[in-house]
Image (cartoon, helix red, strand yellow):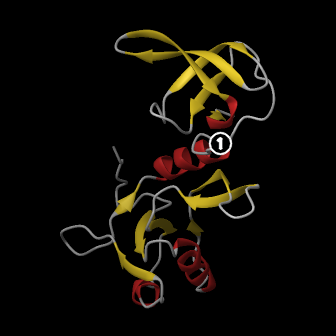
Amino acid sequence: MIAVEKPNSSPHWYVVRCVSGMELQAAEEIAGLGQVVYLPRFRKEFRHARHKGWSVKYLSVMTGYLFVMASENWPRLEGCDHVSEVLRAADNKPYPIADAVVQEIRRLQEAGEYDQLRVHGRVDPGSRLKLLGGALVGRWGEVTASTDQQVVMLLEMFGRQIKATAPVAILGRTE
């Protein structure tokens, strides 16, 4: 749930909707106007289709949205090429977001909570990993045993822990 700040408290952050997939360009345009912009992003590691090598791509955590600190320049901001609109309340004033919410998103981003990076090499028992592929994608589990090619882990499912074996190639780390 998003906490809303009172209009007179500071700092104020506002949500700006931009053209989907063009968040970085929108952030650069807004920053060019002298505004403070925060675009939450995460790293995703993937295998390239042609050369089969592994690459890391940076993607937006909230596709089509970014945060802008308080501004009196809304008409100029909405005139940017990649900006669709500033989210507004019923009274047509920009909708303020609590600084604590933005800072928590920033903290999670910096801690790598949104990242989808694969595991490299052997994993120590007791490590928490996330499945990045397969039928159980998105599930977290604790490693009980490991080789260089696969791990045995306990997944929380159906109200109990289930033992599963997964190849290292589809696993991601929490940190």
Q: Is residue 79 above or below residue 105?
A: below
Q: Amino acid at mark 1?
A: Gly
Is disc 1 placed on a helix, strand or loop? loop
The residue pinned by badge 1 equals 112
- Between residue 109 and residue 31, name the one nearer to us: 109
Q: Position of residue 110 (x, y in %)?
A: 67, 46
Q: Residues within 10 Å of mark 1 (few under 14, many from 20)?
A: some
Q: Is residue 110 above or below residue 124?
A: below
Q: Is residue 30 left or right of residue 84?
A: right
- Between residue 28 and residue 46, name the one nearer to us: 46
Residue 130: image quadrant is: top right
- Between residue 22 and residue 136, name the one nearer to us: 136
Q: Residue at x 58, y 60 (%)?
A: 59
Quadrant where the N terminus is found in the figure: top left
Q: Is residue 115 left or right of residue 122?
A: left
Q: Residue at x 66, y 59 (%)?
A: 57
Q: Position of residue 17 (x, y in %)?
A: 39, 72
Q: Is residue 108 left or right of residue 175?
A: left
Q: Is residue 138 above or below residue 155?
A: below
Q: Position of residue 12 (x, y in %)?
A: 46, 62
Q: Position of residue 155 (x, y in %)?
A: 50, 17
